[in-house]
């Protein structure tokens, strides 16, 4: 890819600008920094925040960082910025991956970026508009085009434990590489059983429980479990919708309302740092819809 080749040329110089990659950014770090440098990653855990550190950069995946942990995140970033740089020839590099539109958090990033010219920031996000203009204006913004279906298929078979059949790939070719890889993963059958058991549990609670106080407690417990195991939302919601569509006791109009609610929540989860609230909201409203 020309973008990767050009970025490799750029990062060979010490003073390249802050860079924002958006759209299909999945392998940009592995295909650039790892081709130039001998990198050995070390995983660091501080309270609830896990990040990657090596001799070239620090990488934070914001998808796994909850909004309530933002103060710890800022503390870690400030400590990295203020610490001595043992690799004097190179600037420090901080990579922020899966940055979503959260105004308060982005305003914090904006101040850190403005006040620390000795650090190179790299932002990876799905949508250009996820990033506020005050940050975008300080970055070199690069859109990475979507990978072709053929190249995606080759990459998936390279990454996967077992080859994906052409028929299975064609059914899911419009989905992301992570999604298709997950479907084909060796543990998928086990995970499908988990999704099925969770779906059974949800509907059992919705139908059989009479006490609203108990229902709310169960919803809180279930939401906590879903956040804790870092469940694949797109696949879980697929199973949830399957149950709703095939349940003959739910009237048609309530099926439509339930499916719309689930799709709205799936979208909200992409931009929310406090995911437990989204799950609780969804389960409580599902109860209200199905019980009417």
Image (cartoon, helix red, strand yellow):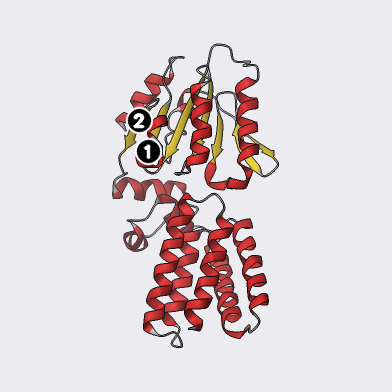
- 7 versus 154 height, above or below: above
Outermost residue on the right side: it is: 47
SS of the residue under disc 1: strand
Q: Give neighbour class at mark 1: few <14, some 14-19, many 20+ (Cα, 10 Å).
A: many
* 42 and 283: which is toward the camera: 283
Q: Position of residue 30 (x, y in %)?
A: 47, 34
Q: How many marks?
A: 2
- 260 versus 16 height, above or below: below
Residue picked out by circle 1: 22
Q: CA distance from mark 2 to mark 1?
A: 8 Å
Q: Which circle's residue, 2 or 1, is located before the other in the chain?
A: 1
* 101 and 1: which is toward the camera: 101
Relative horizontal placement of residue 53, taking residue 150 as reference (left or right): right
Q: Mark 2–mark 1 contact, CB under 8 Å?
A: yes
Q: Position of residue 261 (x, y in %)?
A: 43, 68
* 45 and 74: which is toward the camera: 74
Q: Quadrant of the N terminus?
A: top left
Q: Residue at x 63, y 78 (%)?
A: 212
Relative horizontal placement of residue 85, taking residue 91 as reference (left or right): right
Q: Position of residue 245 (x, y in %)?
A: 41, 79
- 30 versus 280 height, above or below: above
Q: Residue at x 65, y 20 (%)?
A: 83
- 82 versus 29 height, above or below: above
- Image-quadrant location for residue 142: top left
User: Does residue 162 show up?
Assistant: no
Residue picked out by circle 2: 141
Q: Residue at x 70, y 42 (%)?
A: 47
SS of the residue under disc 2: strand
């Amino acid at each position: 890819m020309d973008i990767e080749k050009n970025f490799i040329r750029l990062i060979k110089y010490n003073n390249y600008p802050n860079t924002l990659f958006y759209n299909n950014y999945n392998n940009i770090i592995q295909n650039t920094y790892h081709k130039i440098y001998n990198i050995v990653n070390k995983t660091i855990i501080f309270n609830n925040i896990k990040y990657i550190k090596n001799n070239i950069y620090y990488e934070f995946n914001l998808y796994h960082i909850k909004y309530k942990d933002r103060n710890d995140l800022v503390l870690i970033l400030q400590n990295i910025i203020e610490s001595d740089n043992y690799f004097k020839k190179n600037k420090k590099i901080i990579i922020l991956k899966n940055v979503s539109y959260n105004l308060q958090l982005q305003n914090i990033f904006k101040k850190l970026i403005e006040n620390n010219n000795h650090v190179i920031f790299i932002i990876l996000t799905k949508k250009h508009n996820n990033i506020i203009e005050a940050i975008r204006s300080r970055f070199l913004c690069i859109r990475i085009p979507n990978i072709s279906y053929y190249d995606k298929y080759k990459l998936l078979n390279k990454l996967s434990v077992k080859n994906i059949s052409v028929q299975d790939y064609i059914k899911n070719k419009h989905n992301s590489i992570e999604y298709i890889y997950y479907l084909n993963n060796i543990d998928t059958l086990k995970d499908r059983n988990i999704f099925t058991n969770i779906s059974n549990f949800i509907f059992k609670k919705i139908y059989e429980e009479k006490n609203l106080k108990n229902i709310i407690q169960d919803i809180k417990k279930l939401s906590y479990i879903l956040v804790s195991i870092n469940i694949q939302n797109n696949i879980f919601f697929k199973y949830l919708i399957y149950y709703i569509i095939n349940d003959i006791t739910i009237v048609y109009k309530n099926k439509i309302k339930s499916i719309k609610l689930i799709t709205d929540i799936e979208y909200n989860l992409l931009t929310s740092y406090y995911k437990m609230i989204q799950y609780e909201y969804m389960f409580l409203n599902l109860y209200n819809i199905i019980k009417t």
